[in-house]
Image (cartoon, grey):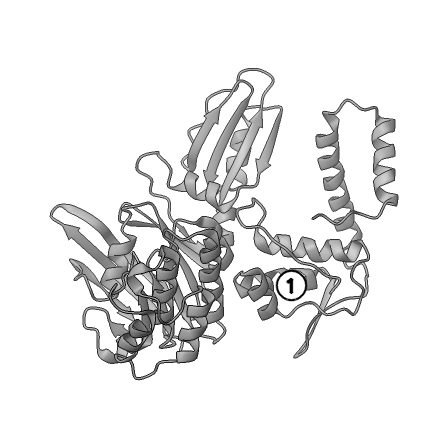
Amino acid sequence: MNEPAIQIQNLTKCYGPHCVVNQLTLEVPKGCILGFLGRNGAGKTTTIRMLMGIVPPTGGSARVLGQPADAWTPELRARVGYLAEGHHVYGWMTVADCGKFQASFYRHWNWDIFHAIIKHFNLRPNHRAGSLSRGQRAGLCLAMALAPEPELLVLDDPALGLDPVARRSLLEAMIYVTRKSGRTILFSSHLLSDVERVADRITVMDRGILRAYCTLDDFRARIRHFVLHFDGTPPSAPDLPNLLHSFRTDRELAVTLVNADGQAESILETLRPRRIEQVDQGLEEAFVSYVGERGEKSFFLHNLGARS
Amino acid sequence: MALTISITSGSPQPIYRQIEDCVRRAILSGKAQPGEPLPSVRALAEELVVNPNTVVRAYSELAAEGLVAAQPGRGYFLAERRQTLSLAERRRRLAEAAATFAREAGFLDFSTRELLAAVEAALTQPPKDSP
């Protein structure tokens, strides 16, 4: 009953000496909308493809809805909706053909959902799939992924190339899916304002390594930005272990800290600034500070208060 | 409905906070009356296109402050206004608000008398609803 929707244990994929996914361990509870974040090449798509049983892992294991991810059964396929990166469709088919073709693979297929989403994206059944716009193609793919009413929906960068209106339709569809409780969605995205709207939790991957897995609010709360005002030239930033980023101007020193506690603040006080201002950051700023340009970092954000 | 709730994503302010503030503003400005129902969690989540848990969080924080009351099975309603914060907590929040004001207005080179007059004017004027 309380079995997680996805369990990943030390999952690793290496191409030669280069590991694109390195010892990934993660558990996604049922009913969660998980935003999967990371820069290009961070290992998101490879992780998803290993989960979907398309790419064999070099090491470790994963379970999807309790079943091993390296041996997908048709029963498991029927319970999982997968939207591959790039919104691929057979161009010579019409929208209706695509629906019929896909439906033939499923025991359960809800045409009402298929047609509702088609309509939502301004598609007509006689449109040829090959002549659709990017957003319409995304709509068609989404309709095909949602019509079987899957328990788990995995969307690999579904918003890629979509205009703001189509993106909003996509988010609406995601919220709609969770009307039935216990439905789980994993979606990767670079659009942090979308993630902020719909995700309960986020994972952040960076160069194959899991760097954060926590609620959105926790992520924002743990990454804090301080501006220290000085009367003269500010000193350089103190050598704090949890310093993510610092920036100096004529009279100010700005520092971004991860997992800042009272102690860090008292260290900032020792620089004797005129005043310290804590500035709220949006999710996007927090993310950029966290996976920004600085070299190796070993921070890991994890919330212990995981729901049971 | 007199209660309009709108949010923007990408803001430094978390979405649940924005929802709370909309409800708070509606109450303070008298646009929404005690006893009025709040939109259901599902309905508001679908209208704003946000995660339903975000709405739950906003509503429960408002409930903890005594601004809204949950009626099991019927949803959330605007509560009769009453003070639920302790005197010490009220004093702390007032000091915090005053410090923020002083910091922001301090740069503007007005006399203390002018600043106080502005505060007085703001208190007597019903707060404007932001767009």
Q: Secondary structure at mark 1?
A: helix
Disc 1 chain ID:
B
* Rendered image quadrant of residue B6: bottom right
Q: Is residue B3 left or right of residue A13?
A: right
Q: Position of residue B130 (x, y in %)?
A: 71, 47
The amino acid pointed to by label 1 is Tyr
Q: Nearer the viewer, residue B119 or A244?
A: B119
Q: Position of residue A129 (x, y in %)?
A: 30, 64
Q: Nearer the viewer, residue A163 or B13?
A: A163
* Crowd rating for badge 1 (residues with CA inside 10 Å; few <14, some 14–19, many 20+): many
* Rendered image quadrant of residue B112: top right
Q: How many marks?
A: 1
Work out which quarter of the rendered image holds the C terminus of chain A and state it. Answer: bottom left
For label 1, the residue is: B59
Residue pictured at 81% horizontal, 64% vertical: B33
Q: Position of residue A64 (x, y in %)?
A: 29, 70
Q: Position of residue A18 (x, y in %)?
A: 16, 46
Q: Is residue B68 left or right of residue A23?
A: right
- In the depicted structure, whether residue B95 falls above or below residue B41: above
Work out which quarter of the rendered image holds the N terminus of chain A and state it. Answer: bottom left
Q: Residue furthest front?
A: A126
Q: Residue furthest top?
A: A232
Q: Is residue A166 left or right of residue A127?
A: right
Q: Residue furthest bottom?
A: A107
Residue pictured at 38% horizontal, 53% vertical: A189
Inspect this view and state whether residue B36 appears: yes
Q: Nearer the viewer, residue A261 or A277?
A: A277
